[in-house]
Amino acid sequence: MTSSDPSATGRRTADELVRRLSRDDGAGADELLAGIDAVRDLVFVGAGLTALARADGRQLPPAQRAQASTRQVQLGRLRDASREDPEGLRRWLRRAAEEVVLLRSLRAAAARVVG
């Protein structure tokens, strides 16, 4: 996965991971993650997912935003526990991507209630 701009590659991979999980393609998501070997590349994907989750979380109502923030802290703990373990980082990325999917569904539900 290494490219001249690893952060851009990480963002694209994060987007693709979320897209696959949004389509209930868990096997495809796992396949995508299995193809990333370097810890550095896994971390760049995580940075992309974190940016997505924070942006989506800011658009939620206050109570849901607070809950999302708490889940981000828990995901950070999972990441920290897996710093040098690629398989552990893949688990973190899968959960982080699932969080983005959840946030987007919460945002859509909130929009239906308001709109």
Image: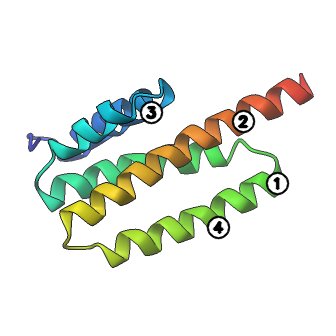
Which residue in the structure is indicated by mark 2? 107
- Locate the N terminus and report the quarter of the image it occupies: top left
The single residue placed furthest to the right in the displayed view is 114
Which callout, 2 or 1, points at the residue further toward the start of the chain?
Answer: 1
Badge nearest the viewer, 2 or 1? 2
Callout 4 secondary element: helix
Q: Which quadrant is home to the C terminus?
A: top right
- Label 3 crowding class (10 Å Cα cut-off): few <14, some 14-19, many 20+? some
The secondary structure type at the circle numbered 3 is helix
Identity, as a three-letter code, of the amino acid under mark 1: Pro
Q: Residues within 10 Å of mark 4 (few under 14, many from 20)?
A: few
Q: Is residue 51 left or right of residue 9?
A: right
Say left or right for 97 vs 110: left
Q: What is the CA distance from the residue labelled 3 to the residue labelled 4?
A: 22 Å
SS for dot 1: helix
| Coloring scheme used | rainbow
- Foreground mark, 3 or 2, reads 3
Write down the residue under mark 4. Answer: 70
Of residue 13 and residue 93, the one placed in the foreground of this image is 93
Kindly identify which residue carries mark 3: 21
Identify the residue at image location x=72%, y=60%: 67
Question: Please, is residue 57 above or below residue 75 in the view?
Answer: above
Tag 4: residue type?
Thr
Determine the residue positioned at 26% across, 52% down. 44
Q: Secondary structure at mark 2?
A: helix
